[in-house]
Image (spheres, rainbow, N blue to C red):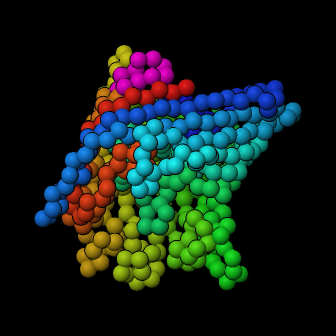
Amino acid sequence: MKKSLIALAVAGAFAAPAMADSGNVTLYGQANVSYDMVDNGNITGTQGTRTNKVSSNASRIGLKGSEDLGGGLSAVWQVESTVDIDGDTGAGANTNTLGTRNTFAGLSGKDWGTLVLGRHDTPYKLSTRNLDQFADTIADNRSLMGTGGGVGFDLRTPDTVAYISPNMGGFSAAVAYVAGAEAASLSTQTKGSAWSLAGMYEAGPLYATLAYQANDFGSAGTGLLAGTANTNEKAWKLGASYKMDAFEGDIVYEKTSDDLGAACGGAAGQDCFGHRSWYLAGKYSFGSDAVKLAYTNAGNNNLAGNVVGAGANTGAKQVSIGYDHSFSKRTGFYALYTKLSNDTNAANGLTTAGSTGGTAVLGNDADPSAWSFGLKHSF
């Protein structure tokens, strides 16, 4: 079904090819570019706009390698960088600098697992990334999932120490610690940090996962996990995928909570942005082609968006439909349509988590949508 996620995703970046010496290096990457026709929707009294753009969708280039140290132990390393093929220079655009994606060094053993240090996606994020049928496009479900009132949960974090277990009868696990306070300068400052954990099980056509992440915030100016000192946000999720002949079904349920009440006009310690969300998708393959459909639903925030109404009408939903065609094992074409509908007190845009083609947030109750036609080549 989905080859081992821990091997391909959480540890896949770590699974460098076996080599006799570190002088051997593997060059790899992905060019994923699309032509997007985007409408950022309408709000009461204001008409949105339609724009056409060429978008880069998680295009990347990387180097990786390993060295056999003997006794079943290997040194592993990777340097991976985003490449914005469209030359995007807009706000928040990546500048194509080195090591912007998963970049690390570590040790790996067949019997005890892999330990790495550097920049990497959290286990929480990776546990369900392969379940998103529209991952790294403008229809990516991270428009509505993995979000929070602080830094959120679907993260690629610096200052990360991660451990990935070996596969044990279909079971595997990953844990990561993020030291988010490297900019702290005073002993009186609270130092933020994060823990992320995921357990995975895969047997034949079935894949299932349970993940948890806790972000503890430190004093302002102390690093990645900084904001209101001594506050936190947490999330857990369940995910599963099952493949039967030509059909594949995927489902994810997520629940977040926090104590950021003061950030949305509530009392200190109140759950402000906490909410539930769920994702359901299906894919049917025939020959070199496939059709797929996905639905994402985010419930009301506990308080945010409308303090008087205690978060009323702050939910949203997204529907996506797509077609894929494979020219070869490495090259494919895709076409998709996606629409996100905000409730009257919600203002979500189509994500830029995996694509430079996302939409700017127009305002509450907007309904952004997009058509996307793309070409993807892996090497």
Q: Residue at x 41, y 77 (%)?
A: 263
Left or right of residue 140, residue 124 in this image: right
Q: Residue at x 24, y 64 (%)?
A: 364
Point out the stretch of residues depicted in magenta. Answer: 324-333
View extreme (left): residue:
45
Q: Quadrant of residue 56?
A: top left
Left or right of residue 5, residue 377 in this image: left
Q: Position of residue 201 (x, y in %)?
A: 56, 39
**Does the segment drawn in magenta span residue 130?**
no
Q: Nearer the viewer, residue 60 or 323?
A: 60
Left or right of residue 230, residue 69 in this image: right
The answer to whether residue 354 of the structure is visible from this angle is yes
**Does the segment drawn in magenta span residue 329?**
yes
Q: Position of residue 199 (x, y in %)?
A: 58, 47
Q: Position of residue 38 (x, y in %)?
A: 26, 45
Q: Position of residue 296 (x, y in %)?
A: 32, 48
When the figure is inspected, residue 372 is found, relative to residue 238, above or below; the finding is above
Main secondary structure along the magenta-highlighted residues? strand
When the figure is inspected, residue 298 is found, relative to residue 37, above or below; the finding is below
Location of the C terminus (image quadrant): top right
When the figure is inspected, residue 200 is found, relative to residue 329, above or below; the finding is below
Left or right of residue 173, residue 291 in this image: left
When the figure is inspected, residue 22 is found, relative to residue 125, above or below; the finding is above
Q: Residue at x 30, y 78 (%)?
A: 307
